[in-house]
Amino acid sequence: MKNFNIYIAVLAGLFLFGCSDLDTFPEGGTVTEDQKKEVVSKNPEMLRSDVTGLYASLIKLNTLGGSTTQHYDFGHAGVCLMLEASGQDMPAPNSAYNWFSGSMIFDNRLETGNNPNFIWKSFYNHIKAANNILEIVTSDTEDPTLKSFRGQALASRAFDYLHLAQIYQFTYNENEDKPAVPIVTEKITQEQSKNNPRASLKDVYELIIADLDEAIILLETFNRPAKDVIDQKVAYGLRARAHLLMQNWQKAAQDAEKAMQGASPYSLQEISNPAFNSALASSWIWGNIISETNDVVRSGIVNWPSHLCSLTGNGYTTLTGTYRWINNKLWDEIPSTDARKGWWVDQNLKSPLVDNMKVTSGGKEYSAAEWFKWDPYTNVKFGSYKDVPNNTLNASDWPLMRAEEMILIRAEGMAMSGNVAEAKAILENFVRTYRDPSYTCNAASSIAMQDEIWFQRRIELWGEGFSFFDLQRLRKPMDRSGATTFPEITRYNLPAESKIFLWLIPESEITANEGISEAQNNERVNPPKI
């Protein structure tokens, strides 16, 4: 009993500071992996704080560390906004107040920059947290709680590698043997980590699928406490994304259907108001739940609503006019009968979502457009915290996976596996029921269906971190030409798979990892010019 109590005391410290760090007993001697496993097997709850930490790291403030916080450094949503700014659908002012302007003008890819370090650290720190759990909870565990912990860790790691694979290499098909990123699992030794080359894209995706295959089995009976926690449906959704990228069309469709069980899209009424700010929505399968006491909220303006919500009372958007707009060419293509067209104000600052919205200040009432001083095509998709216009608290949740995405994956998977008629029925049912009652899909081939679904994804998932990855996945050129909402110097028209699309592996990784030389990094390319 004495030894067991000592293990508990020591491991409490290990879990607080990181399971990969070795510590010693009070009497001296090293705590071995077997001893840690023994303690956890007797008391699985000892590991719960580490699992909770997996989700806390997705909303972490100041991943880069240091005394000065970069104002894009507020967790996974910050990565999503970098990705969105790199594409063709979310223009913004090219100003000092736009912390994502580097992504928009492509001068943030270099290995010495803070942006690549932020992306790299965000995902590899999360991988380390997952590996710490997987090191303790092995595949032979029989305890239901530990099975759920292992399943969440495996799916979390797959989530990270899905992003890293797309950020540092082009899409899977025809690039399988090209270098992606180093693979770090719970089995890697410290010495191996110092000489760990970039694995091929094929090897990375094999790990992703293997992790998700096991996670889906382990999470079969797990009932999560809240939507920020990964359950079996989330794991199915992540595997649907992976199969879509690998062009395993039928598998993608099957997994997407399983992922959305129990979820339903935002209704036509719900999306006719600013929304996308609460994980309580039936549409959300998975999301970051953010509370008023989280560091990103207490920071004031270092959080996603500050940079994306056009209705906050305390953000870069409303305080400095650094709004996120839509590509006006894309907005023009949205039918007037589609309720989503109102997710952005028009040239006259009108939208059914906000035309009747009022803001009261100093005893006087203002229209929302008058108070916030929006620009044409400013987004009003994302509601303010608790749907209170001009709310100075930025504690809104962030969507990571929605039912609508799964519907669109299912439709694309059906179309590309040869079942165009069923794919069309799925798409028409979704759009007519939830977005545009007069919608008709005119696509007659699998490729035409894929393009129509891409158009629907550009509208539906705007701002949520998918648009740039879709350009890569579908091998589309990036066309900002003629889009007046983009600053003139950024109206690029770049061919598909332009080398500038890939970020460079940070210098810090190349210095620490003998397995990657400067010559083995992605190619350094000058920012484009119009």
Image: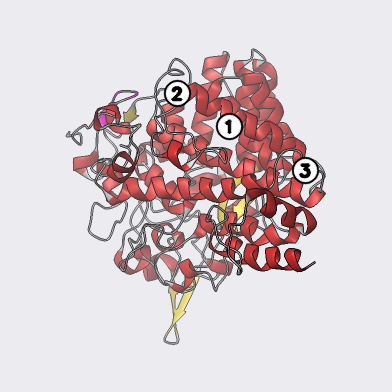
Q: Which residue is drawn at 52% across and 35% down?
A: 457
Report the residue marked by disc 1: 208
Q: What residue type is labelled 1?
A: Ile
How far apart are the alpha carbons under marks 2 and 3?
31 Å
Instruction: Name which residue type carries label 2.
Output: Ser
SS of the residue at dot 1? helix
Q: Does the magenta stretch include residue 288?
A: no
492 up-or-down from 36: above or below: above
SS majority, magenta: loop
Any part of residue 93 in sight: yes
Residue that badge 3 annotates: 141
Please tell me whether residue 346 is drawn above or below residue 187 in the rendered image.
below
Marks 2, 3: nearer the viewer: 3
Which residue is rendered at x = 67% and y = 39% of the image?
A: 235
Mark 2–mark 1 Cα distance, whole angstroms, equals 13 Å
Element under label 2?
loop
Q: What element does badge 3 sit on?
A: loop
Q: Residue at x 22, y 59 (%)?
A: 96
The spot of residue 529 in percent (x, y) is 17, 34
Q: Which of marks 2 and 1 is nearer the N terminus?
A: 2
Give the magenta-colored segment's residue range: 493-497
- The residue under the point 26% across, 29% down is 493
**Residue matched to label 2:** 200
Mark 3, other Cα within 10 Å: few <14 / some 14–19 / many ≥20: few
Q: Reading the chain from its start, which is encountered first: label 2 or label 3?
A: 3
**Above-or-below relation of 26 to 522:** below
Q: Nearer the viewer, residue 83 or 485?
A: 83
